[in-house]
C-alpha cells in the first residue's frame, strides 16, 4: 500500500522543439589574438549542431610572400558551476540549500540571494579608464591593455566601450551610455577559463584562478557585484596584473625553440643522500638509497611530461582512463582549421626601371561542423578564433651538426634515455655581441629550456637565409635576432636603453601580432583599424531544447 504522506514525484511536461540560431558575423583580427566570435547560452537538455562556413581575406600585402598562416575555429563548452560553485543552486532557485561553505560558523544557515556575479556598464567603463591612465599597464607586447580589453568586451557582446579605453577624457560621469545595464560576468569568466585550460602553457605560465573563478563570492547579497574589487587603493594589484577583462594570445607552434620545458623534471633533481663521514673517507650510500632516488626521479619526469590537470596526472601515473567528469577543465568540442593562401597580384604598368610590381593577397576558406549534447548542465558554448603564423627563422642559426667536436657530442644509443638536455641560447643563434642596437652579451650564458635527449637528431626548424634576412624580409614571416631580443627582454622598442636579459618567461612563447609587420602595408598597433585579417563567418546553428515554439498555453 502506498504511503500517501510521501511526496509525489512530479515532473514538468516540457515541449521539445528545434530552433534556428544561425547568424553571420564579420570580424577583424590580428595574428595571435584569441577572439570569442560565437557565444551561445546552453540550457539543460540542449542538443546543438553547428555548421561553420568562413571566408577570410587579408589586408594588402607588400609582396607575394612565401608565408604560411593557419586559422583556427575552436569550440568549447564551459559549465557555469566551474566558474562559480553556487551557480547550479541559484539557477534551480534552491536558495536555502547551498552546497558550498561560505563561513566557518556552523550556526549560520545561509540563504542565497538569487543573483549572479555581475558588473554594471559603468563599472566596465570606470575600469577601462583606470587602466588607460598609465602606460605602465600596457601588455607584454606594448599594446594598450585597455583597448585590448574593450575589443574583448565587444567580441563577447558586452557593447562598445572603446571610448573609455582611450584615456580619461571620456569618462562615465561626463559621457554615460544610454543605460547603466547590469551584466553577468560569465562571458569574461568562460573566456579566461578556456584560455587557462587549453591555450596557457602550464609548464611556463602559472594559473590565475581569480581570472575565471569567483567562488569567493558568497552569493547572499543582492548586489553580488565585483565592482567593489575594482575601485579604491586595494584594486591596484588586481588592475596591474592580468585579470578577467584581458585579451589573450596564443602560443607559437611548438618546435625546437618554442616547444621547450623550463625544467628537466618536476621540481628539483632527485639526489642520493649520503651520510657524514670524516675527511679523507669516501662517502657511502646504499643501493636502496640509489633505487629510491631513481624512482623518485622517474615520478618527477612523468609528472613533468604533461598538463597539471587532475585527469591528466591520474592517467599518467595510474594508467587508468578518467572520465571528463573528474576533470576541472571545460570541454573541448572540436575545431576547424585551414590555411591562408597568399597569391600574387601583378601590376603590369611599367615602372621607372621597366619592371612589374608584384604584391600579394591572402585568402582562406574554412568549413566544418560540431555536434554537442549538454546533458543536465547550464553553461555557455564559445568559439575562439585565432590566426597562427608559421615562423621562418631568420636568426643567425647554427647547424648543430657542425658544432659537434668531441666524439661524445654525437648520439650514443646507450645514453638516449638519460633524460632531457639543456638547450642553450647559442644553439638558436650566435649573433655579434652588439648589433641593431642590442647588446647580446648577457644572452651568452642563457639556457632557453630543456628538450628531449639528442633533440638535434629528432626535429628541425624552418629557416630563411640570404636576402630574406635583410632586404627581402617582407617576403617571409621573419623571426630575427631582434625578434628574439624583444621577447626575451620584453621591450618593444630598441630606441631606449640597452635591454637586459630577464629569465625565460611564458611571454617568449606568445605570438606577437607585430611579427607580420614586414608583410603588410600597415603596421600593427593597439587600434582595431590595424587588424590584418578580415573574416566573414556564417554559423549555421540548430538547437533542440525543451522549450515551446510560441510560449502560449493553447
Image: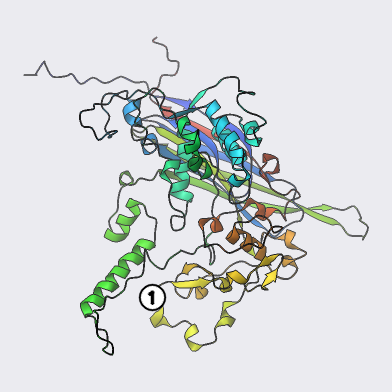
Residue 420: give x, y in percent of width and height. 42, 71
Answer yes or no: is residue 394 visible. Answer: no
Residue at far left of view: 1
Residue 312 to residue 468: above or below: above
Q: Quadrant of the N terminus?
A: top left
Residue 237 to residue 70: above or below: above
Residue 433: give x, y in percent of width and height. 66, 73
Q: Nearer the viewer, residue 231 or 117?
A: 231
Identify the residue position indicated by label 1 in the image: 417
Task: Determine the residue positioned at 58% across, 64% down.
Answer: 501
Residue 96 relative to residue 479: left or right: left
Q: Nearer the viewer, residue 262 or 501?
A: 501
Q: Quadrant of the C terminus?
A: top left
Residue 28: give x, y in percent of width and height. 65, 40
Q: Residues within 10 Å of mark 1 (few under 14, many from 20)?
A: few
Task: Determine the residue positioned at 31% across, 47% down.
Answer: 323
Question: Which quadrant of the structure image shows residue 358?
Answer: bottom right
Answer yes or no: is residue 443 visible. Answer: yes
Amino acid at each position: 500500500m502506498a504511503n500517501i504522506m510521501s511526496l509525489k514525484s512530479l515532473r514538468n511536461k516540457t515541449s521539445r522543439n528545434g530552433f534556428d540560431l544561425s547568424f553571420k558575423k564579420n570580424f577583424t583580427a590580428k595574428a595571435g589574438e584569441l577572439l570569442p566570435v560565437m557565444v551561445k547560452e546552453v540550457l539543460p537538455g540542449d542538443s546543438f549542431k553547428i555548421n561553420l562556413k568562413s571566408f577570410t581575406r587579408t589586408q594588402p600585402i607588400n609582396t607575394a610572400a612565401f608565408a604560411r598562416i593557419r586559422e583556427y575555429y575552436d569550440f568549447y563548452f564551459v559549465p557555469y558551476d566551474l566558474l562559480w560553485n553556487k551557480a547550479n543552486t541559484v539557477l534551480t532557485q534552491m536558495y536555502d540549500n547551498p552546497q558550498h561553505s561560505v563561513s566557518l560558523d556552523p550556526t549560520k544557515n545561509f540563504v542565497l540571494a538569487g543573483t549572479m556575479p555581475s558588473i554594471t556598464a559603468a563599472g566596465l567603463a570606470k575600469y577601462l579608464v583606470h587602466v588607460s591612465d598609465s602606460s605602465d599597464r600596457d601588455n607584454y607586447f606594448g599594446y594598450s591593455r585597455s583597448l585590448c580589453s574593450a575589443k574583448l568586451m565587444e567580441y563577447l557582446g558586452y557593447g562598445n566601450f572603446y571610448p573609455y579605453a582611450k584615456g580619461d577624457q571620456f569618462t562615465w560621469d561626463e559621457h554615460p551610455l544610454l543605460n547603466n545595464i547590469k551584466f553577468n560576468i560569465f562571458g569574461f569568466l568562460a573566456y579566461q577559463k578556456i584560455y587557462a585550460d587549453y591555450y596557457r602553457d602550464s609548464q611556463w605560465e602559472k594559473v590565475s584562478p581569480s581570472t575565471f573563478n569567483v567562488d569567493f563570492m558568497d552569493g547572499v547579497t543582492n548586489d553580488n557585484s565585483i565592482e567593489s574589487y575594482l575601485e579604491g587603493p586595494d584594486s591596484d594589484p588586481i588592475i596591474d596584473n592580468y585579470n578577467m577583462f584581458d585579451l589573450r594570445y596564443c602560443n607559437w607552434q611548438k618546435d625546437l625553440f618554442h616547444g621547450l620545458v623550463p625544467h628537466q623534471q618536476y621540481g628539483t633533481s632527485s639526489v642520493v643522500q649520503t651520510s657524514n663521514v670524516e675527511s679523507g673517507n669516501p662517502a657511502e650510500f646504499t643501493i636502496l638509497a640509489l633505487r629510491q632516488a631513481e624512482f623518485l626521479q622517474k615520478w618527477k619526469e612523468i609528472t613533468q611530461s604533461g598538463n597539471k590537470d587532475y585527469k591528466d596526472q591520474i592517467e599518467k601515473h595510474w594508467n587508468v582512463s578518467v572520465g571528463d567528469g573528474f576533470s576541472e577543465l571545460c570541454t573541448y568540442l572540436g575545431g576547424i582549421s585551414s590555411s591562408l593562401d597568399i597569391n600574387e597580384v601583378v601590376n603590369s604598368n611599367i615602372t621607372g626601371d621597366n619592371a612589374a610590381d608584384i604584391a600579394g593577397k591572402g585568402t582562406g576558406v574554412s568549413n566544418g561542423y560540431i555536434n554537442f549534447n549538454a546533458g543536465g548542465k547550464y553553461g555557455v558554448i564559445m568559439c575562439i578564433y585565432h590566426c597562427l603564423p608559421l615562423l621562418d627563422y631568420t636568426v643567425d642559426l647554427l647547424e648543430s651538426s657542425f658544432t659537434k667536436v668531441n666524439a661524445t657530442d654525437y648520439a650514443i644509443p646507450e645514453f638516449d634515455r638519460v633524460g632531457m638536455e639543456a638547450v642553450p641560447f647559442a644553439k638558436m643563434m650566435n649573433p655579434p655581441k652588439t648589433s641593431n642596437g642590442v647588446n647580446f652579451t648577457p644572452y651568452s650564458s642563457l639556457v632557453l629550456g630543456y628538450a628531449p635527449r639528442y633533440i638535434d637528431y629528432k626535429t628541425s626548424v624552418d629557416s630563411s637565409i640570404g636576402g630574406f634576412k635583410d632586404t627581402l624580409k617582407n617576403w617571409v614571416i621573419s623571426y630575427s635576432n631582434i625578434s628574439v631580443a624583444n621577447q626575451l627582454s620584453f621591450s618593444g622598442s630598441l630606441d631606449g636603453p640597452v635591454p637586459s636579459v630577464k629569465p625565460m618567461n611564458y611571454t617568449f612563447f606568445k605570438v606577437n601580432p607585430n611579427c607580420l609587420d614586414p608583410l603588410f602595408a600597415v603596421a600593427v598597433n593597439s587600434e582595431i583599424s590595424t587588424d590584418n585579417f578580415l573574416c566573414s563567418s556564417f554559423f549555421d546553428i540548430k538547437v533542440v531544447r525543451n522549450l515551446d515554439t510560441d510560449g502560449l498555453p493553447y
